[in-house]
Image: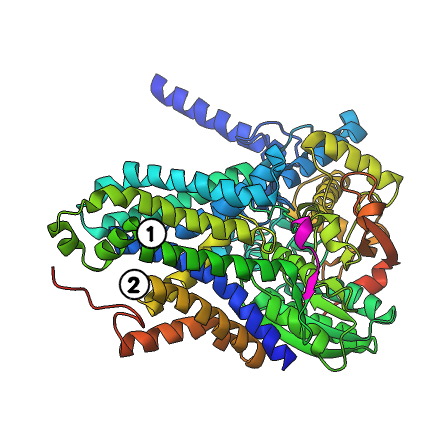
């Protein structure tokens, strides 16, 4: 039983990363109809940013947790204005290529500065060690990540449900044309929302730095899984992304622990689930068919 | 015969005579060197995951060997014209294949060195065989290079998967860690390492209590780390065959889950000094692994490492030292043979016993071209024991050359 609880806990921690990344991706897609392939690269920049702050400026983890997402949010807004926006009226393929190219550029810039070796980033002193839950113990840092990610997801949810910006974002996400027709200036919110999505990716990156290898390629493999998560949850569905993120984290952890004779099963489970979900509900678990304009 | 005819006949005669004189289009008449010079080629990863452990610093190591060779022989050196060509194979076998052929054919390279990534190394060995030119493999690990893929022109320096498994697996088991839990990345290198380690551990009286293939690449190993202390019997040691970024992930998480405190030690299949540098000794303290060479082992190694540090800003990995040694031994063989003709150089090298800064009790086996030498069981120091940068490990044990490597394989027919 304790082993099961440990694996479950572990799955939720992996899920927390997927959820944070999927949430940002979903908000961006919902508002801009841009599939942001560079999301993994921004996640990587979050981790590298934390490392840079620590080594170049002596800024500890806790400040990085605040500074990096803000900085990446601003960078994200710049990217939206300078690159994404001008392509908005063209075929979506252009933005697809743009964000893919952006990934390569960002990865190579980091490679040029830090090489491909992983950079060391320790666990913050306050969170070294394990927390004893009676039946089992668990690394303190992971407990923190889980709590933090859940709080962040709930905060975003509250923001979307209870503020005017949130209302506009939700409306524009689900019925963009109708929202415009009601005289709401959707365009005004596009840039900040893009920045916000990037900030979430950066936040996930900072959280990853103490427990994962910090290197230019760390986002490249993850982003594929995150895309599958977003598709399973339903493109553009905020709740769907978060739920699918945690769900896939759990499935992977359970799969790896209980189907360990067949590692390939756990590895491919997310894509198998995606295929099944798409056959059953083409818009994803919580997605809605595109409303006619 | 008219005047024009006379000129033509005279020129033809002159051409004929110059041909008979042996002075071909390549110049001086007494040179035994192709192109009148020696060209070494360093073919490796200059932009990817193996950049730090070999890469551009391997080129520096080869240049150091050339300088030392020239200084030693002075005017008696077979030539002062020794140059290095380099290329980036991006760890891709097809790129390695093309670049190796280009080096031998177009750049006039006499011997290729280094070549990390086993699949790329195997391709280069094929090209060497086909072109009848030398290849010193330093950083490719596969034992196939001295097994079914061996050939007359390929020499395997430094290390291989058998040496790693036999060193760490056997020594750690003999030191009392009987029960092993092995996790390995699910691709060729990892699968090969898992087999070699299992054989070495069980051969030494140990037991594999669990083995798991992990996704590759992978950023989350917690499932396997959680499982380790719950296995029955509880493993004394977790043997990891991961490399590069995956190794970093695994070690970080191993520490996070406090496995050492729970009685599960850590053994790493393959690790380079640069890996320890990037992970920090604190993250790896107590970890054992097999090292082919260590820069602070004795005064001789240290003085080489001091020069290397001055040149590159970093201490040498065993791959760097081995590149230096291979380049030096190649040049000495050419000097002794008096020619860079590949067959004559091979004859010089085969069966030769060598001691230099890298090779201790070194011998180039004639049977399979495996270069055997002492290897070392190393342990990463606790942070408090680290008194200077890069001096991260202590050598627990020297594994004698004859024990460190497997006996010549029956698969190898040179």
User: What SS does tag 1 mark?
Assistant: loop
Q: Is residue A40 above or below residue A147?
A: above
- Whether labels 2 and 1 belong to a single chain: the reply is yes
Residue, disc 1? A36
Q: Nearer the viewer, mark 2 or mark 1?
A: 2
- Of the 4 image quadrants, the one containing the N terminus of chain B is top left
Left or right of A206 in this view: B193 = right
Q: Which residue is painted at 57% across and 63% down in the image?
A: B220
Residue furthest top as drawn? B3
Q: Position of residue B217 (x, y in %)?
A: 53, 61
| Residue A127 in magenta stretch | yes
- Of the 4 image quadrants, the one containing the C terminus of chain B is bottom right
Residue, disc 2? A235
Left or right of B92 in this view: B399 = right
Q: Which residue is painted at 48% across and 58% down in the image?
A: A151
Left or right of B269 in this view: A199 = left
Residue B46 visible in the displayed image: no
Quarter assignment of residue B77 = top right
Which stretch appears magenta?
A124-131
Q: Position of residue B23 (x, y in %)?
A: 58, 29
Which chain does the residue under circle 1 lie in? A
Quarter assignment of residue B328 = top right
Residue sitting nearer the eye, B231 or B196: B231
Q: Residues within 10 Å of mark 1 (few under 14, many from 20)?
A: many
Q: Which mark is residue A127?
A: none
Callouts 2 and 1 close, C-beta under 8 Å: no
Q: Which residue is painted at 77% across and 32% down in the image?
A: B307
Q: Position of residue A291 (x, y in %)?
A: 16, 64
| Residue A103 in magenta stretch | no
Q: Which residue is painted at 57% across and 49% down in the image?
A: A214
Residue sitting nearer the eye, A157 or B157: A157
Query: Which of pointers 2 and 1 lies earlier in the amino acid sequence?
Result: 1
């Amino acid at each position: 039983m304790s082993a099961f609880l440990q694996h479950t806990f572990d799955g939720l921690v992996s899920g927390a990363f997927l959820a944070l990344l999927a949430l940002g991706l979903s908000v961006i897609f919902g508002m801009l109809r841009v599939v942001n392939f560079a999301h993994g690269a921004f996640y990587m920049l979050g981790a590298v940013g934390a490392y840079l702050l620590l080594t170049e400026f002596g800024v500890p983890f806790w400040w990085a947790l605040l500074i990096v997402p803000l900085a990446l949010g601003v960078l994200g807004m710049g990217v939206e204005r300078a690159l994404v926006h001008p392509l908005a009226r063209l075929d979506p393929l252009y933005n697809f290529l743009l964000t893919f190219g952006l990934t390569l550029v960002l990865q190579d810039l980091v490679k040029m500065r830090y090489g491909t070796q992983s950079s060391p980033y320790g666990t913050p002193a306050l969170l070294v060690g394990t927390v004893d839950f009676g039946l089992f113990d668990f690394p303190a840092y992971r407990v923190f990540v889980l709590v933090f990610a859940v709080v962040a997801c709930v905060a975003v949810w509250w923001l979307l449900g209870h503020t005017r910006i949130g209302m506009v974002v939700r409306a524009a996400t689900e019925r963009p044309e109708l929202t415009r027709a009601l005289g709401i200036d959707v365009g005004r919110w596009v840039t900040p929302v893009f920045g916000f999505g990037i900030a979430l990716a950066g936040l996930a990156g900072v959280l990853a730095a103490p427990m994962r290898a910090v290197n230019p390629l760390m986002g490249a493999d993850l982003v594929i899984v995150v895309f599958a998560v977003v598709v399973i949850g339903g493109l553009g569905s905020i709740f769907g992304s978060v739920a699918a993120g945690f769900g896939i984290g759990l499935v992977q952890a359970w799969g790896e622990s209980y189907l360990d004779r067949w590692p390939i099963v756990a590895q491919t489970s997310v894509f198998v689930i995606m295929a099944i979900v798409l056959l059953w509900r083409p818009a994803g678990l919580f997605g809605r068919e595109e409303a006619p304009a | 015969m008219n005047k024009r005819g006379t000129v033509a006949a005279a020129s033809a005669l002159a051409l004929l005579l110059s041909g008979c004189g042996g002075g071909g289009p390549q110049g001086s008449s007494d040179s035994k060197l192709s192109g009148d010079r020696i060209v070494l080629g360093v073919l490796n990863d200059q932009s990817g995951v193996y950049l730090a452990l070999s890469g551009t610093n391997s080129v520096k190591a080869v240049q150091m060997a050339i300088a030392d060779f020239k200084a030693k022989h002075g005017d008696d050196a077979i030539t002062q014209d020794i140059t290095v060509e380099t290329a980036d194979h991006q760890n891709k076998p097809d790129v390695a294949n093309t670049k190796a052929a280009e080096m031998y054919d177009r750049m006039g390279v006499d011997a290729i060195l280094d070549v990390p990534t086993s699949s790329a190394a195997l391709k280069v060995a094929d090209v060497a065989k086909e072109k009848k030119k030398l290849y010193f493999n330093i950083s490719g690990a596969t034992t196939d290079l001295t097994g079914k893929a061996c050939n007359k022109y390929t020499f395997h320096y430094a290390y291989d998967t058998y040496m790693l498994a036999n060193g760490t697996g056997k020594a750690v088991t003999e030191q009392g860690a009987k029960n092993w839990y092995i996790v390995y990345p699910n691709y060729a290198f990892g699968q090969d390492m898992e087999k070699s380690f299992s054989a070495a551990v069980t051969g030494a009286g140990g037991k594999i209590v669990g083995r798991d293939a992990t996704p590759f690449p992978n950023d989350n190993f917690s499932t396997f780390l959680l499982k380790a202390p719950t296995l029955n019997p509880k493993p004394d040691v977790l043997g990891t065959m991961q490399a590069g970024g995956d190794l970093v992930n695994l070690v970080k998480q191993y520490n996070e889950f406090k496995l050492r405190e729970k009685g599960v030690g850590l053994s790493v299949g393959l690790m380079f000094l640069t890996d320890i540098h990037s992970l920090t000794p604190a993250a790896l303290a107590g970890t054992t692994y097999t090292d082919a060479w260590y820069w602070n082992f004795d005064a001789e190694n240290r003085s080489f490492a001091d020069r290397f540090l001055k040149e590159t800003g970093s201490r040498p990995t065993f791959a760097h030292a081995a590149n230096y040694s291979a380049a030096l031994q190649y040049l000495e063989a050419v000097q002794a043979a008096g020619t860079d003709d590949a067959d004559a150089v091979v004859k010089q090298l085969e069966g030769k016993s060598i001691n230099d800064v890298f090779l201790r009790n070194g011998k180039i086996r004639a049977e399979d071209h495996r270069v055997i030498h002492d290897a070392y069981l190393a342990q990463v120091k606790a942070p408090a024991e680290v008194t200077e940068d890069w001096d991260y490990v202590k050598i627990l044990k020297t594994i004698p050359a004859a024990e460190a490597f497997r006996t010549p394989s029956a698969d190898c027919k040179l």
